[in-house]
């Protein structure tokens, strides 16, 4: 399954919500409410971006956010989902037969934000001063405290009828990240507090797309879930819920079976497939008990088959386009001996160095494998026009084969081991993380070898 970011054109703002713990007076939280902060103005702001600004957002890998159409947030539903989210794993309904895995890759596909290899680390004590000084220089402020969300928004509202200078591009990129993190991806308080915890990455703004923003957002959601569950257990006032509380909602709804009403899963980012009325209808259909404290009980709808593919690419032609599109491919896992099924294609394509390449750690470099894609002495066929690309994977005690079908936009995983009936591990679970690493490695090689 190819894990990549996305594209598309309107951002909104979802922020902290306030509830009361069971036993206290229940607040007036109607089924669907606007959050405490600006939604429509933010949507108008991003929809008013010019071509240069949209291109800069695309360069950073955040253009998926421009597809968001939601302007309302169901606070009760969001809080209920957070109560079902395991703070350690991030999974919904952890430990049950209905467990749904929420990974960084899912966050990337849901929101259309980067899921790069660089970790977003907070500035350590002796770095904080330098980071703040850099921000003051960028925004021409005497002190970091002078940097407010109002200042940030005014910069983003600026129109350009000429080509932006290099400095203006850097300022815009930095401003955009601060705005979306503060107002949407990882809000920390109702007061629009601008946190420094991620700004070390902004010093390296030209490489912002290489950072794992999906992991950063997921970490905040886990913290929010832990805080909410702690307060409910101890019957405390819940107060404000930080983090991107909207994130788990389309993820959960994407895993429910609404029959023909389910939005198509070939479109990425997933959040762009939902509008306010659709969310409201799906939530209403999932309600079990409305009059419950501190929020209603949901979970009426059946979950989709866990082995059904959530996301796919849709129609395309050619291997390069298949990997280039910032989306996922379909997957089908066959519990059969790969030596038998793949014998014909292995004979036709066998012997290439790429079949034995390794990927996944920080030392892996796609440039080392370019000859396996372009060297005529190694590759007697045209890679971009291939129907199938095979990648064997050495796992503990056995080999599996990843077969990328570029015409049908599917990933076939050929695994000779039996699944959970004979082992403690389900076949699909065995490849849950590996498929993202392999697909990402293939994508990187294809982009370098065939950039056009």
Image (spheres, rainbow, N blue to C red):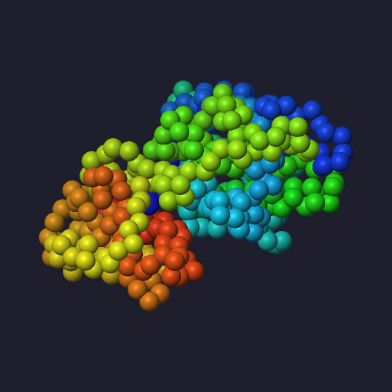
Horizontally, residue 446 falls left or right of residue 144, namely left
Q: What is the quadrant of the C terminus in the image?
A: top left
Q: Kindly tell me whether residue 449 is visible in this rendering.
A: yes
Horizontally, residue 198 falls left or right of residue 365, namely right
Measuring 38% from the left and 55% from the top, which residue is drawn there?
440
Locate residue 52: give its quadrant: top left
- Expressed as whole percent of the image width and height from the top left, the position of residue 434 reads 42, 61
Measuring 45% from the left and 62% from the top, which residue is drawn there?
426
Locate residue 253: give its quadrant: top right
The one of 35 and 297 positioned closer to us in this rendering: 297
Measuring 64% from the left and 50% from the top, which residue is drawn there?
85
Where 197 falls versus 126 (above or below)? above
The one of 295 and 61 positioned closer to us in this rendering: 295
Q: Kindly tell me whether residue 113 is visible in this rendering.
A: no
- Expressed as whole percent of the image width and height from the top left, the position of residue 218 reads 59, 50
- Expressed as whole percent of the image width and height from the top left, the position of residue 191 reads 76, 36
- Expressed as whole percent of the image width and height from the top left, the position of residue 374 reads 20, 58
């Amino acid at each position: 399954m190819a894990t990549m970011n996305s594209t598309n054109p309107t951002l909104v703002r979802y922020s902290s919500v306030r509830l009361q713990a069971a036993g206290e007076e229940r607040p007036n939280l109607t089924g669907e409410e606007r959050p405490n902060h600006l939604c429509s103005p933010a949507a108008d702001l991003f929809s008013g971006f010019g071509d240069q600004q949209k291109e800069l957002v695309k360069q950073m890998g955040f253009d998926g956010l421009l597809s968001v159409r939601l302007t309302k947030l169901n606070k009760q539903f969001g809080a209920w989902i957070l109560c079902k989210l395991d703070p350690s794993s991030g999974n919904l309904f952890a430990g049950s037969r209905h467990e749904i895995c929420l990974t960084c890759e899912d966050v990337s596909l849901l929101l259309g934000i980067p899921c790069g290899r660089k970790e977003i680390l907070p500035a350590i004590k002796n770095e904080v001063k330098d980071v703040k000084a850099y921000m003051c220089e960028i925004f021409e402020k005497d002190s970091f405290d002078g940097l407010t969300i109002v200042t940030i928004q005014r910069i983003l509202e600026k129109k350009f009828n000429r080509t932006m200078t290099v400095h203006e591009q850097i300022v815009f990129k930095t401003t955009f990240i601060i705005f979306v993190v503060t107002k949407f991806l990882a809000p920390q308080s109702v007061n629009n507090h601008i946190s420094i915890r991620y700004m070390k990455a902004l010093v390296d703004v030209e490489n912002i797309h290489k950072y794992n923003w999906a992991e950063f957002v997921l970490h905040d959601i886990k913290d929010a879930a832990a805080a909410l569950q702690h307060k409910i257990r101890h019957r405390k006032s819940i107060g404000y819920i930080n983090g991107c509380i909207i994130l788990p909602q389309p993820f959960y709804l994407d895993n429910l079976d609404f029959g023909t009403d389910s939005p198509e899963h070939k479109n990425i980012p997933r959040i762009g497939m939902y509008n306010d009325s659709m969310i409201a209808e799906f939530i209403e259909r999932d309600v079990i008990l409305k009059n419950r404290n501190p929020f209603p009980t949901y979970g009426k709808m059946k979950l989709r088959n866990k082995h059904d593919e959530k996301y796919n690419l849709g129609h395309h032609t050619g291997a390069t386009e298949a990997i280039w599109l910032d989306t996922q491919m379909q997957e089908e896992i066959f519990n059969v001996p790969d030596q038998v099924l793949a014998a014909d294609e292995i004979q036709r394509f066998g012997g290439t160095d790429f079949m034995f390449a390794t990927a996944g750690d920080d030392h892996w470099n796609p440039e080392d494998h370019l000859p396996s894609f372009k060297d005529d002495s190694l590759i007697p066929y045209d890679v971009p026009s291939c129907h199938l690309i095979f990648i064997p994977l050495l796992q503990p005690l056995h080999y599996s084969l990843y077969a990328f079908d570029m015409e049908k936009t599917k990933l076939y995983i050929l695994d000779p081991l039996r699944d959970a009936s004979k082992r403690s591990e389900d076949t699909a679970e065995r490849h849950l993380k590996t498929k993202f690493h392999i697909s990402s490695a293939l994508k990187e090689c294809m982009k370098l070898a065939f950039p056009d």
